[in-house]
């Protein structure tokens, strides 16, 4: 799992905030219990710290602490029994004065055996969702709100399959891809087709689902991603290096609107680096584009390079989008 430093810092800050809130709340609850029953506070004070006091004393006097410790243990047991009875009278559980970690797996440290614990990963996922929703209208674009009604069930183009049948397959494939996503295991997708057919919608739905599972997702337009590469080349901006590292290292990269940027030799080589680099590292990538990849008319090969086209052909599953422009349909045109 590749974590983005910036997002992880935000997640850690939230994580610590919540931990402090829980600690404060527990301290208040404890004070409340002590006010209702001061004897419990006295017991609490006695139970904490006595053991170490006895041992220090015994060590200081050169005596064997075992007898004293044994006596203390018995005393403690009777104090614990008294505490239990007092709590019971107050209608409270016997562990009401014990502070328990919210996450028993890591004891609220956020890390377990050198790895990020599940609890902190949830914070990370939430911060990432916020980051992504700044980029796109994630709120509205999910698998639940995707509708097949916009696609005609008539095979008017004579393709042997209607736009709706095709989209039903594309939709189910994308949904399964998102649900079964595993970094290093999942493949790559190329969403290709004319404008207004739901490519951005479905890739946003995938981004939402995959990042919701806690995987790191970078979602951006091709133009903006190439701009980050260029910023590194020209040393334009300090943040660019971190951005390029995120683009190359994230668990899932979604590059939207490929082909709308100005094609330069630099863009061609950056795209090769992204596609080839991520294939070698087995890092899944999703591209969306209006460019065609037909055998007779491969616009990707023409615009970028045969090397790029060949890698896409060999390593990407092609998802064709066709039908009527939904932007226009929604306007009633
Ligand atoms: N299946 C759908 N159900 C409901 N709304 C949809 C659906 N598909 C697309 N839309 C809406 O239609 C509009 C265009 O969709 P989208 O932006 O995904 O198209 P696109 O294929 O990415 O187009 P472009 O190639 O121009 O980027 C958006 O407002 C989107 O919310
Ligand atoms: Mg789009
Ligand atoms: Zn944990």
Image (cartoon, rainbow, N blue to C red):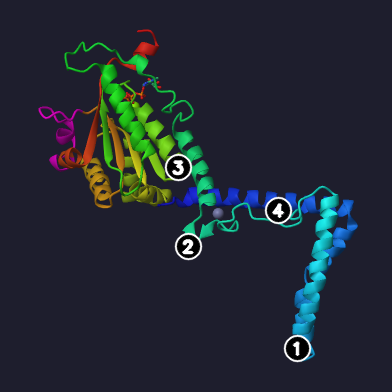
Q: Secondary structure at mark 2?
A: loop
Front-most of 139 and 246? Answer: 139
Q: Earlier in the sequence, mark 1 or mark 2?
A: 1
Q: Which residues are magenta?
A: 292-308
Spatial distance from mark 3 to mark 1, Cα to Cα?
56 Å
Mark 4 = which residue? Answer: 23
Q: Earlier in the sequence, mark 1 or mark 4?
A: 4
Residue found at the far bottom of this picture: 62
Proximity of marks 3 and 1: CB atoms separated by less than 8 Å: no
**Of the numbered discs in the image, which one, if any, rests on residue 114?**
2
Label 4: how many residues lie within 10 Å, few (<14), some (14-19) or many (20+)?
Answer: some
305 is within the stretch colored magenta: yes
Spatial distance from mark 4 to mark 3, Cα to Cα?
28 Å
Question: Ligand 3 within 8 A of label 1's CB?
Answer: no
Q: Nearer the viewer, mark 3 or mark 1?
A: 1
**Of the numbered discs in the image, which one, if any, rests on residue 64?**
1
Label 1: how many residues lie within 10 Å, few (<14), some (14-19) or many (20+)?
Answer: few
Spatial distance from mark 3 to mark 2, Cα to Cα?
20 Å
214 is within the stretch colored magenta: no
**Of the numbered discs in the image, which one, if any, rests on residue 213?**
3
Is residue 267 found left or right of 84 in the rendered image? left
Q: Earlier in the sequence, mark 2 or mark 4?
A: 4
Residue located at (54% from left, 48% from top): 11
């Amino acid at each position: 799992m590749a974590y983005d430093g910036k997002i992880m810092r935000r997640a850690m800050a939230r994580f610590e905030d919540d931990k402090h809130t829980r600690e404060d709340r527990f301290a208040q609850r404890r004070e409340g219990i002590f006010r209702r029953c001061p004897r419990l506070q006295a017991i609490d004070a006695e139970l904490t710290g006595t053991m170490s006091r006895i041992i220090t004393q015994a060590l200081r006097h050169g005596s064997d602490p075992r007898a004293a410790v044994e006596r203390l243990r018995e005393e403690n047991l009777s104090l614990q029994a008294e505490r239990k009875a007092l709590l019971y009278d107050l209608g409270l559980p016997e562990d009401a004065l014990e502070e328990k970690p919210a996450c028993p797996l890591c004891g609220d440290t956020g890390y377990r055996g050198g790895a990020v614990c599940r609890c902190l990963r949830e914070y990370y996922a939430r911060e990432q969702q916020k980051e992504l929703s700044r980029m796109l209208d994630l709120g509205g674009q999910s698998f639940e709100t995707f509708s097949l009604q916009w696609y005609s069930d008539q095979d008017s183009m004579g393709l042997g399959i209607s736009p709706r049948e095709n989209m039903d397959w594309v939709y189910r494939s994308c949904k399964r891809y998102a649900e079964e996503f595993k970094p290093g295991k999942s493949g790559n997708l190329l969403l290709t087709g004319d404008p207004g057919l739901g490519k951005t919608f479905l890739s946003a739905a995938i981004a939402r689902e995959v990042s919701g599972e806690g995987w790191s997702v970078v979602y951006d337009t091709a133009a903006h991603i190439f701009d980050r590469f260029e910023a590194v080349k020209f040393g334009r901006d300090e943040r660019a290096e971190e951005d390029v590292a995120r683009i190359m290292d994230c668990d899932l990269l979604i590059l939207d609107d490929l082909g709308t940027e100005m094609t330069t030799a630099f863009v061609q080589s950056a795209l090769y680096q992204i596609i080839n680099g991520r294939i070698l590292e087995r890092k899944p990538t999703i591209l969306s584009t209006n460019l065609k990849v037909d055998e007779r008319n491969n616009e990707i090969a023409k615009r970028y390079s045969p090397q790029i086209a060949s890698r896409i052909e060999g390593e990407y599953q092609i998802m064709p989008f066709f039908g009527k422009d939904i932007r226009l349909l929604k306007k009633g045109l």
